Amino acid sequence: MRVFITGASSGIGAALAKHYAAQGAQLGLVGRNQERLTTLSNELGANCAIYVLDVRNATALQQAAADFLARFGAPDIIIANAGVSRGTLTEHAEDIAAFQAVMDINVMGMVHTFQPFIAAMKQAGSGSLVGIASVAGLRGIPGASAYSASKAAAISYLESLRVELIGTGINVTTICPGYIRTPMTDVNPYPMPFLMEPDTAARKMARIIRQKRRIAITPWQMAFAGGLMRLLPAFVWDWVMKKAPYKPRLDWDWL
């Protein structure tokens, strides 16, 4: 099995790398932190290629894809997992850069990840493209407008891509997880229902990928909640969310 994962230096990406390494997969691991990627690769003791890059850089991902294809061949699974979150408010001019970064990483980073592999996967007539979206993409979350918008865009993009690739042998899966314990959620100052540990989330996601589901929300409790979120009329959603706590507007090194 050949698996290419972005955002692999921590959180879900690292947990997915460990899951697939335990199955003997050949791995391509993408992240911005060379030290963490190297440590992870050494820990796994697996057949790994690491690529230190920013998913906003399409050229860097094209070069990484070319190297992976030359080493291992067409991937069986590509997981576009790289993503960032930060509290944002449109009224603050200084948040414009954060809006841009969130959209570029969470949406265009996904496009940059898939694009260089599709021709080889079409030739192979198989493979899975997996995008990690979020329950936050189902409705607009106050105080996290950039993140919600980026994940909503990712969901729509993946749906378009799925239909475009019908008949090629390439499967497209959209995964919308709820809360997962990662550095991004550690700063949240509010309760996070159905919070999953990264290894638990990775196992659930791997099962969804193996089943080649079109779109899935995990865990099941969040799938139920997500269904209700989509059904609520706008005026009810506004009433429910108007007093919701906001994600902190913190500075991140990815801006």
Image: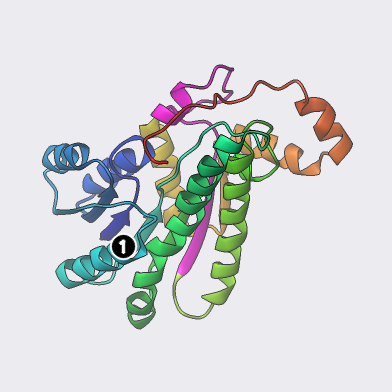
Between 255 and 23, the one lying in front of the other is 255
Q: Which region shows up in magenta?
A: 171-197
Q: Is residue 43 magenta?
A: no
The residue identified by callout 1 is 61
Between 67 and 98, the one lying in front of the other is 98
> Residue 205, percent across and down?
44, 45
Q: Is residue 187 left or right of residue 247?
A: left
Q: Is residue 181 magenta?
A: yes
Tell me: residue 105, above or below residue 187.
below
Between 56 and 121, the one lying in front of the other is 56
Between 169 and 187, the one lying in front of the other is 187
Q: Is residue 105 visible?
A: yes
> Residue 133, percent across and down?
53, 48
> Residue 81, percent across and down?
41, 48
Going by the numbered disc 1, the residue's amino acid type is: Leu
Query: Can you tell which quarter of the image residue 58 is in?
Result: bottom left
> Residue 123, percent across and down?
34, 82
Q: Residue furthest front?
A: 93
Query: Can you tell which quarter of the image residue 201 is in?
Result: top left
Q: Is residue 182 visible?
A: no
Tell me: residue 18, above or below residue 244.
below
Q: Residue at x 31, y 62 (%)?
A: 61
Q: How many marks?
A: 1
Q: Residue at x 16, y 43 (%)?
A: 41
Q: Is residue 190 left or right of residue 114?
A: right
Q: Callout 1: few (<14), some (14-19), or many (20+) C-alpha neighbours within 10 Å? A: many
Disc 1 secondary structure class: helix
Q: Is residue 138 left or right of residue 185?
A: right
